[in-house]
Amino acid sequence: MIKLRQSQHEGEETNLQSEFNDMPLSTIYTKTLTIPASAIDENGHVNNVTYVQWMQDVAVEHCASIGGIEAQGPVSTWVVREHKIEYLLPAFAGEEIEIRTWVENIRRVRSLRKYEFVRKADGRTLVKGETDWVFMDIETGSPRAISEKVARIFTANPDGL
């Protein structure tokens, strides 16, 4: 079982993270897809912007799969503050890839989610990315503190965390 700890450094927000820095806070969500021809750009490989769309799509799928949409309620939502992405190898139409995502940490109003795109045929990592998500109040458009209920959705795992 992974234990959680809260850390706070001067000038930083409270941070809910795993006991081990190299361990994700949430379970890892995976999705396998075959790259469609529509994802290929003029250079003959997956368009860079397509990866960003897939990052957003798999984040929403993961959140929905663990009850996150219901937990956040009708007046809250997540918005992207920042995407970071590192392209390591190209991918091509017809290749099967596995997209992996997990929540790395949860802070007062923000959460860092990470991603890996791996080619199934050889196990090589194609892309690594992360998104800094901000929890927002839909009515005011302002950041909203992440409730314990929402935080627990992301930290729950089969090992009883």
Image (tube, grey):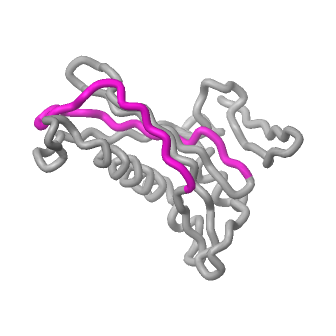
Q: Is residue 89 left or right of residue 102?
A: left
Number of numbered discs: 0
Q: Is residue 123 left or right of residue 82?
A: left
Q: Is residue 69 left or right of residue 112?
A: left
Give the residue displayed 62% in from the left and 49% down from the top: 111
Q: Is residue 90 magenta?
A: yes
The magenta stretch spans which residues? Answer: 81-107
Tell me residue 71's x, y (percent): 58, 65
Quadrant housing the C terminus? top right
Secondary structure that dominates the magenta span: strand
Extreme residue toward the bottom, this view:
139
Tell me residue 137's x, y (percent): 64, 73
Q: Is residue 41 left or right of residue 61?
A: left
Extreme residue toward the right, this view:
10
Up the image or down, 119 lies above or below 154; here it is above
Tell me residue 30's x, y (percent): 37, 39
